[in-house]
Every structure is written in C-alpha cells, then in structure tokens.
Amino acid sequence: MSNRGTQLILSVVLMIFGFMLALQLKARPAITANISYQRAAELTALLKAVEEERNSLREEVKQLRDRLAESAAGLSREQALREELSKARILAGLADVKGPGVIVQMTDSKKPSTAGQDPNVYLIHDDDVRAVVNELFSAGAEAVSINGQRFVATTEIRCAGPVFMINGVRVAPPIEIRAIGDPETLDSALHLRGGVIDNLALWGIEVKVKREEEVLVPAYNGTLQFKYARPVKAEGTR
C-alpha cells in the first residue's frame, strides 16, 4: 500500500474518533444534570423524612413533659397530704415527738404532819398535776406526757385512792411531767412568784424543773373512739 492510501485511512480513523469524542463531550453535561437532579430528589426526600421524625420527637418530648408535670403535681399533692397528716398525728398525740423542753419532777412532801392536820395536804393530788400541766400549756408547750402517758384531748387526771388514773392507767408518785417547748419560757412560767411551784411549796411538795435540749414525749397508746362526736360538714358540701 502506498503512503497516500495509508494517510487516507489514518485520516478517516481520526475523523471517526474525533466525531465520537465530540458526541461524548456533548452528552456529559446531560448525564451530569441528570445525576444532580436525582441527587437533589434524594436529598429532598431525606430532608422530608428527617423533618417528620423531628416533629414526631417533639410531640413525644411534649407528652413526656406533660406526664412529668402531672407526676410532679401529684407528688406535690401527696407530699402536702403527708405533711398535713403528720401535723394532725402530732396534734392528736398519736406520734412520738422530741425537741427542747423541760422535765418536771413532783414528789410528796417530807414534812411531818402536825397534830390535828389532814396528812393528805402533804401529798400530790390530781389538781396539783393539772395545775402544772395547765401552766405548761399556757406557756406554749406543744406536747406533754405524765409518767409516760401522753396528754391528749380525752386524757383524764383524777385521784383513785393513793394513785392517779391517767388515760385509764394507774400512775403513782413520784410524778414526771415531760413538756416540749421553749425551755426558758416553760421554766419561767412554773417559777412565777406566787405561781404553781410556790403554792405547792407551802405544803412541802417538791417540784424540780430541769431544762433539756431534747425531750422525748411518747405517743398516746390508747384507743380513740368517738361515740357521740361527729365532724361538722362545711356549708355547701354533701
């Protein structure tokens, strides 16, 4: 084959190659655009899914916050009721309590009775104990016990021969009265000039008061039954 034929064939091959290259370059932007469009569609769908999930999580968080708020409110109400119940138990004398206060010791007189005088005047009587207890409550005592018997609304203090009956329990002298309150105020109230201690001292009845940083007053251990008393309902309630 001559050189001229070879050049002709080479020229034809180059032309075909160039034509194919031109077609390829022309088609590339379309392919790129198609890929970009598909990518954008995929991202849009992904974004929509993420937004839906976010909204779902927000709603779940809101529900959880509402439940938490309801639980907190319920706990607050329960705690308030527990505190009110605890106060009621203390006021009713149904709970052991402790705090600062005084311990009062009362003992019969050691003075010998004179001829013709009633020897009972030298002994502690129920009204003597009531006088001390009343003075303590008047001075702000918050809880009182007598020889381990908690003083409550139904507590009786009465003589029964040589002993006392307190909450239906026999109690014999010496008498120990425990009271919770401000120790200085309670002590001062009992030692008022012309007060209960001075009056008892006229008959030789000894009353000793000791201030304490912590006094334990036991709970009432009897039964509380109301046969006749009934709570009065507030107006407008059924």
Image: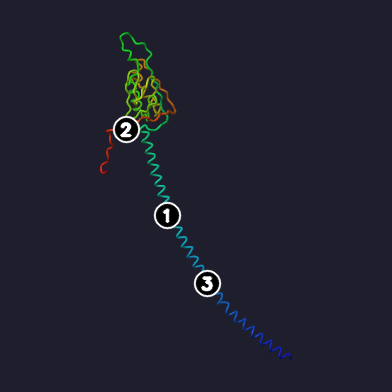
Q: x, y (%) of residue 218?
A: 40, 29
Look at discs 3 and 2 and give the one toward the viewer. Answer: 2
Which of the marked residues, 2 or 1, is nearer the chain's N terminus?
1
Q: CA distance from mark 1 to mark 3?
A: 38 Å
Q: Secondary structure at mark 1?
A: helix
- Where does label 1 land, which residue? 63
How packed is label 1: few (under 14 Cα within 10 Å), some, or many (20 or more)? few
Q: Which quarter of the image is occupied by the N terminus?
A: bottom right
What amino acid type is highlighted by mark number 2? Gln
What amino acid type is highlighted by mark number 3? Gln
Q: Which of 75/167 is in front?
A: 167
Which mark, residue 211? none
Name, please, the residue furthest toward the left. Answer: 235
Q: CA distance from mark 2 to mark 1?
A: 48 Å
- Where does label 2 land, which residue? 225
**Residue 31 position by quadrant:** bottom right
Name, please, the residue furthest toward the right. Answer: 2
Which of the marked residues, 1 or 3, is nearer the chain's N terminus?
3
The number of numbered badges drawn on the structure is 3
Horizontal relation, residue 65 to residue 224: left or right: right
Q: x, y (%) of residue 68?
A: 43, 50
Q: Which of 187/238 is in front?
A: 238
Which of the marked residues, 3 or 2, is nearer the chain's N terminus?
3
How packed is label 2: few (under 14 Cα within 10 Å), some, or many (20 or more)? few
Q: x, y (%) of residue 178?
A: 39, 26
Which mark, residue 38? 3
